[in-house]
Image (tube, grey):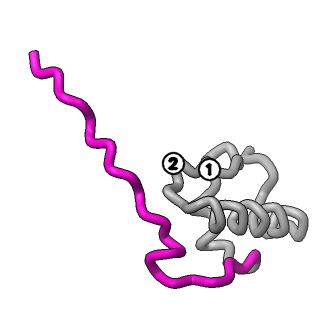
Amino acid sequence: MNMTKPNNSKKVCYFCSNDIKIIDYKNVILLRKYINTVGKILPRKKSGNCSKHQRMVSQAVKRARILSLLPFVAK
């Protein structure tokens, strides 16, 4: 029985690696990557974002929900 540790390589922030300064709430295609099937915002550990960009993503998702661009909950 092989008892090796899983690969715990840290994910790289998509926005830092692509030098994206502003996360727009109107870019629904990008924001859908950061919400799960139920409609919740993915945490930093799953998304791999840094704290600065995670806050920007969550703010953009919340704004897109208010304007009915993204759903609050999935059906």
Image quadrant in which you'd find residue 75: top right
Residue tagged by mark 2? 46
For the point 71% across and 68% down, the residue is: 56
For the point 32% across and 50% down, the residue is: 9
Taking the magenta stretch, the answer to whether it contains residue 9 is yes
Residue tagged by mark 1? 42
Mark count: 2
How dense is the environment of label 2, judged by Cα within 10 Å: few (below 14), some, or many (20 and up)?
A: few
For the point 61% across and 73% down, the residue is: 29
Decide: marks 1, 2 in contact (CB < 8 A)?
yes
Check the image and report above or below for 63 versus 38.
below
Q: Is residue 10 left or right of residue 7?
A: right
Element on which disc 2 rests:
helix
Check the picture and name the quadrant holding the N terminus: top left
> x, y (%) of residue 14?
48, 70
Determine the main secondary structure of the stretch shown in magenta.
loop
Residue situated furthest right in the rendering: 66
> x, y (%) of residue 5?
24, 31
Q: Nearer the viewer, residue 6 or 24?
A: 6
Amino acid type at image mark 2: Lys
> x, y (%) of residue 50?
56, 62
> x, y (%) of residue 45?
52, 47
Q: Which residues are magenta?
A: 1-25
Element on which disc 1 rests:
loop
Q: Is residue 42 left or right of residue 56?
A: left
Check the image and report above or below for 14 versus 7.
below
